[in-house]
Every structure is written in structure tokens, then in C-alpha cells.
Image (cartoon, rainbow, N blue to C red):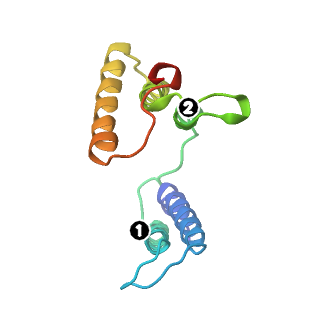
Amino acid sequence: MSIKSQKDFFSGLVFMGVGGAFAWGATTYTVGSGARMGPGYFPLMLGVLLAIIGAVIAFKSMVIETEDGEKIGKWIWRPVGFIVAANLAFGVLLGGLPSIHLPPMGMVIAIIALTLISAKAGTDFILKEILILSAILVVGSYVTFILLLKLQIQVWPAFIAG
């Protein structure tokens, strides 16, 4: 059997890898049964389902003929780098980094940084639009997580909130 769609084949492999990792990681928790689910039940089932979907996609890529083989192009590293950096910055700003004595900066600063850094991954960077998006995300996150779900997330940096 030969690969008839490279994109689908490697996408299926990634799905199988991520699903398998989630399923394997979920086994460290109590799984339980369908009637009495433990904390590992949902991640285990989700990981298994993702791996099955990946296997179906990979199998389909070897069975269904495509016109040009759907070759994988070269990686565009700039967007990947900015998206990874945006997520790392969000985590560091939200929770702080004690090893370098960086205190938590709060949800507002973390969301603004996430939006600004991830916007650099695209081709158009219009500051006004990005700041509007940031404001909408901050308000939506505040309403959802602080007001409705009542989560204890630091909203502002300690030097502002006191």
C-alpha cells in the first residue's frame, strides 16, 4: 500500500500520537467505569477516540487516490514560533515565574500579550484591530471565568491590585 495523500497520512499520525499520549497519561488517574467515572475516564476516552480518528484518516490516505498526492509543503516557521511564544508568554504572565522572581501579572496583561504576540504570526498586523480584539477577549474572559464560573484567577498584577 502506498501513501496517496501525504497531508492526510501525516495528520493521521499526529492525531494517533497525541491521542495515544493522552490515553496513556490518563491511565495514571483512576479511570472507573461508565457508571462511576473517575478523573481519568474522560481523557482516556478522548485520547482513544482521537487515536481512532487518526487511524481512520491515515488509512483513508492510503486508499483514496488524490490528484497530486497532496504533498506536504515546507514548514513556515515564523507563525509556528509566534504561536508557541504567545502561549508560553501567556502561561508565564498568568502564573509568574518564581525561578527568575517574576510575579504573576494577571489575566488582563496575559491576554493582551497573548493577542499581540500571536497576531505577529499573520501577515497583517493592524494594532487598532488587535487592541479591540484584546479588549473583547479580556471582557469575555472576565465575565466567563471570574463572574460566572467564580474561578480564583488573579486579574491584575499584584502591584496594581495591592
Residue at x 45% of width, y 35% of height: 154
Residue at left 32%, top 26%? 133
Name the residue at the right extreme.
99
Q: Mark 2 belongs to which amino acid? A: Pro
Residue 111: x, y in percent? 43, 30
The quadrant in which the N terminus is found is bottom right
| Quadrant hosting residue 46 | bottom left
User: Which mark sits nearer the N-terminus, 2 or 1?
Assistant: 1
Up/down of 68 relative to 124, above or below: below
Marks 2 and 1, how far apart at CA: 51 Å
Dot 1 surroundings within 10 Å: few (below 14), some, or many (20 or more)? few
- Viewer-nearest of discs 2 and 1: 2
Residue pushed farthest front?
A: 162
Under circle 1, the secondary element is loop
Q: Amino acid at mark 1?
A: Ile
Whether 61 is drawn above or below 69: the answer is below
Could you tell me residue 74's position as x and y percent?
58, 40
Quarter of the image where one finds residue 144: top left
Residue 109 percent across, percent down from the top left: 46, 25
Q: Secondary structure at mark 2?
A: loop
As drawn, 15 above or below 35 = above
Residue 64's disc is: 1
Disc 2 target residue: 104
